Amino acid sequence: MKQFHYYFLAITLCVCSSACNKHTPVTNPDDYKEFLRATTDNLILIDKEISFWSKKLKEDGSHFGAQTKLGGLYAKRFQYSGNIKEVHKADSFYKVANRIQKKFSSGIYRNLAANAITKHQFWQSKYFLDSAAQLGDNLGYTLLQQFDTQLELGNSYEAERLLNRYQNPNTFEVLIRKAKLSDFRGNLEQAVLLMEQALDKVSVINDKAAWLWIKSNLGDFYTHANRFTDAYQCYLDVLRFDSENYHSLKGIAWLAYSYEKNTKAAKEILHFLKKVHHIPDYDLLLAEIAAYENNEELSKAYTASFIKQVTAPEYGDMYNTYLFDILSEENNSAAMALAQKEIRNRPTPQSYDLLSWAHYRQGNIKEALRIATGYVENKCFEPSAQYHLALIYKANNNNKKAKHFLKEVSSAFVELGPLFEQNFRNQNL
């Protein structure tokens, strides 16, 4: 689920008093301050391997193993550096490996598909995986990635069909995907249970990478389920095994800001993350916090920085949804075009939510309702989509439906953020 919905940033509201809507803290700087010191242990290890395989490649330009190893290492490096150019570099090594052996192995196809998902090139990912499936080797791994791609494209029933073909239904690889499917269909409680079962299947000793991924994502699920203490503990557990797990640090920053309204702690974490992990996301969140603190000038500066970064060619369509949230407040025709582009890229219920909202913002309330009822309602369970449904139904004089969806939204204030909550309460919906 997306944690931050930008279209509320343009609304200038007075910040509540310090006692307003604050909760008992779940975060404690004494727990995580040791992780706010810059380390590059993972990058050092990766760079050593890159150096080794680069020498191999220099000795033999047709070294197939070196090409594939370097592709994997640059993809892994991206996780810690945040430099999107390293994903493109990984692709270049995989493609050279293909030319060396004259055809792709299914493994290279899967690697290219994983990179394509990272870049939000979902149809390209489907092509790579269909090709991998035709080769037939290691079909189980291909099926799992096909599930991932189909779910990204909004084809939940096809994704489920592919997952049912996997021979062992009780592995953690299958359980985490069942959790994703349950979350996609709006059953968060079941998603949490399945992710917990997946965690039980792995140990940090036997598969550190899998354990870290499951535990950190379980923290996200707990946050969405309003189990904030459990979420915080997940993030801390992950950081104790990998102090450079920036996803978990960002999760703690979100809890500090959205649940506790502790903007000082959240900003301290985010400013650290900006120094060590160079992705645009932190500017987006800092822009929201600045708006919440009624610092319009700073919010605009962070917003401009975010836009400048994500509109660089190497990011492609990765941040279209977030750009839509900005444009839907400032330029309705550009927002409409971007929503239509997202539907072409990934015709999911969430993409159709963007389109229905763009029509609503343009005053086309009947068309907004048509799209919302046909493609979004009972199909997209994101809190932002529920809010859009409420306003679209209200605009079309269906107050009963509007109240139903507003009730759904009221339980997701922490997920949507304090700025949204202020707007929601001030509208007296």
Image (cartoon, grey):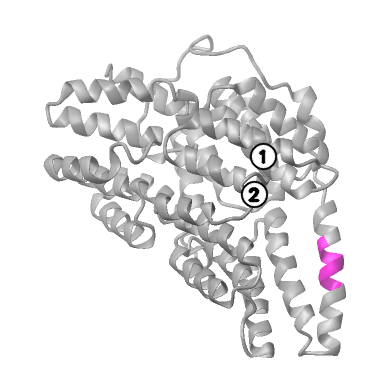
Give the SS element for disc 2.
Answer: helix
The residue lying furthest to the top in this view is 19
Give the SS element for disc 1.
Answer: helix
At x 59%, y 64%, the residue is: 142
Q: Is residue 49 above or below residue 389?
A: below
Structural crowding at the residue carrying mark 1, measured as other residues with C-alpha within 10 Å and reported as few (<14), some (14–19) or many (≥20): many
Q: Residue 58: x, y in percent? A: 83, 86
Residue 330: mark: none
* Sequence-earlier tag: 2 or 1: 2
Q: Is residue 343 above or below residue 289?
A: below
Residue linked to disc 2:
173
- Label 2 – label 1 distance at C-alpha: 8 Å
Task: Kindly indicate the quadrant of the structure image that contains residue 236.
Answer: top right
At x 60%, y 44%, the residue is: 176
- Return the residue nearer the eye: 112 or 279: 112
Please state which amino acid type lies under the numbered disc 1.
Answer: Ala
Per the image, is 47 magenta?
A: yes
Q: Residue 157: x, y in percent? A: 40, 51
Residue 75 visible (yes or no):
yes
Quarter of the image where the C terminus is located = top left
At x 48%, y 58%, the residue is: 318
Residue 198: mark: 1
Task: Kindly indicate the quadrant of the structure image that contains residue 100.
Answer: bottom right
Please state which amino acid type lies under the numbered disc 2.
Answer: Glu
Specify the segment rendered in magenta.
46-51
The residue lying furthest to the front in this view is 167
Structural crowding at the residue carrying mark 2, measured as other residues with C-alpha within 10 Å and reported as few (<14), some (14–19) or many (≥20): some
Q: Main secondary structure of the magenta part?
A: helix
- Return the residue nearer the eye: 20 or 130: 130
- Return the residue nearer the eye: 19 or 63: 63
